[in-house]
């Protein structure tokens, strides 16, 4: 009797070890192919990022800020700008990235949304991949070229109407090539410039256009304290703050963040990504 008990225990241990190791030999767990019903729970479908419903006449919806009454949440967003023709400047040493800023956000445990151009992802694929695979951050689309989608937009070159959607999609292709696994279905117009024609051209892309309600003024700023004051003075529950992740064009952003984050936390604010604010606007959070 003892030997039978020992033999049964040994078989149970062997079976547990094989199951734990996921062996793929001839001894397989029963499943639908062997005629036995599967008892494994169905794998849940991956949740889709929240987006807004199409706007009037089915146009691309535009999001500016979250609910004002859903708690003190605020989203810091950073535009990783690089235009399609700035490669020679990068080759000569100009830095369009800002790894110090990303490190500070990580150290301060601040979630954020980075609106990245495809050209930036091509220039800094390791950084794009690192940001995109960090659950603290989410990457959204800022076009491939950073060319404007309207005329007369801060002197930016323009994209013709028939190339607007392909410019957006080219950015997603650049993200995938850099190793970004799940770029968000959010789009920020270069310069924030858009019109009805641009919204119409992007309708089929299924994105939500994301603007902002707080301008940090960090572009080309030299006074970090002034940038911090702009953000602190403008912040409201549900706000979307626009900043930049480009050392050459926004050299004081990282220093400003070191002031902004603790000050807003003292006021009771919680930092979230844009997706959470859009989810709250949809009643999903």
Image (cartoon, rainbow, N blue to C red):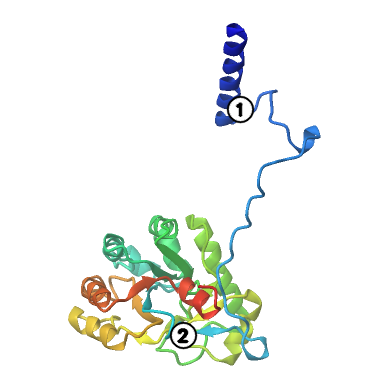
How far across and how far down the image is residue 131, in percent?
40, 60
* Label 1 close to label 2 by CB (< 8 Å): no
Give the class, few, some or many, for how many residues have Cα within 10 Å of label 2's Cα (few <14, many ≥20).
some
Q: How many marks?
A: 2
Mark 1 and mark 2 lie on one chain; the one further toward the N terminus is: 1
Q: Position of residue 242 (x, y in %)?
A: 37, 80
Q: Residue at x 61, y 18 (%)?
A: 11
Give the mark toward the camera: 1 or 2: 1
Left or right: 242, with 34 as reference point: left
Which of the two residues, 111 or 89, is positioned nearer the viewer here?
A: 111
Separation (CA) of disc 1 from disc 2: 52 Å
Residue for badge 2? 64
Taking 41 as reference, is 123 above or below it? below
Q: Quadrant of residue 230?
A: bottom left
- In the image, residue 179 above or below residue 274: above
Please state which of residues 246 and 255 is positioned toward the viewer in this rendering: 255
Q: Could you say where residue 228 lies in the image, as x and y percent from the top left?
A: 23, 81
Determine which quarter of the picture holds residue 34. Answer: top right
The residue depicted at 31 percent of the width and 60 percent of the height is 106
Name, please, the residue furthest toward the front. 1
Which residue appears at 45% of the width and 70% of the height? Answer: 117
Q: Position of residue 197 (x, y in %)?
A: 60, 90
Give whichever of 182, 118 is nearer the camera: 182
**Residue 66, label in figure:** none
Query: Is 245 drawn above or below residue 175 in the view shown?
Result: below
Tell me the SS state at disc 2: loop
Write down the residue under mark 1.
23
Q: Residues within 10 Å of mark 1 (few under 14, many from 20)?
A: few
């Amino acid at each position: 009797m003892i030997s039978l008990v020992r033999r049964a225990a040994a078989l149970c241990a062997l079976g547990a070890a094989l199951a734990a190791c996921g062996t793929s030999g001839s001894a397989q767990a029963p499943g639908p192919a062997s005629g036995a019903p599967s008892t494994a729970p169905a794998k849940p479908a991956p949740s889709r990022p929240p987006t807004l419903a199409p706007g009037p006449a089915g146009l691309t919806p535009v999001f500016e800020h979250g609910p004002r009454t859903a708690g003190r949440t605020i989203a810091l967003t950073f535009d990783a700008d690089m235009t399609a023709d700035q490669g020679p400047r990068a080759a000569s040493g100009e830095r369009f990235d800002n790894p110090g800023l990303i490190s500070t956000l990580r150290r301060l445990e601040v979630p954020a949304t980075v609106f990245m151009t495809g050209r930036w992802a091509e220039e800094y694929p390791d950084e794009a991949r690192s940001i995109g695979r960090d659950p603290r951050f989410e990457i959204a689309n800022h076009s491939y070229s950073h060319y404007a989608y309207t005329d007369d937009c801060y002197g930016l070159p323009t994209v013709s109407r028939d190339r607007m959607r392909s410019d957006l999609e080219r950015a997603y292709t650049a993200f995938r090539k850099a190793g970004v696994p799940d770029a968000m279905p959010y789009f920020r117009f270069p310069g924030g410039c858009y019109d009805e024609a641009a919204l119409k051209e992007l309708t089929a892309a299924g994105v939500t256009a994301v603007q902002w309600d707080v301008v940090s003024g960090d572009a080309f700023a030299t006074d970090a304290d002034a940038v911090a004051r702009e953000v602190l003075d403008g912040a409201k529950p549900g706000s979307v703050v626009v900043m930049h992740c480009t050392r050459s064009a926004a050299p004081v952003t990282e220093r400003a963040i070191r002031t902004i984050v603790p000050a807003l936390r003292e006021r009771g604010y919680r930092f979230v990504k844009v997706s959470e604010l859009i989810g709250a606007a949809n009643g999903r959070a």
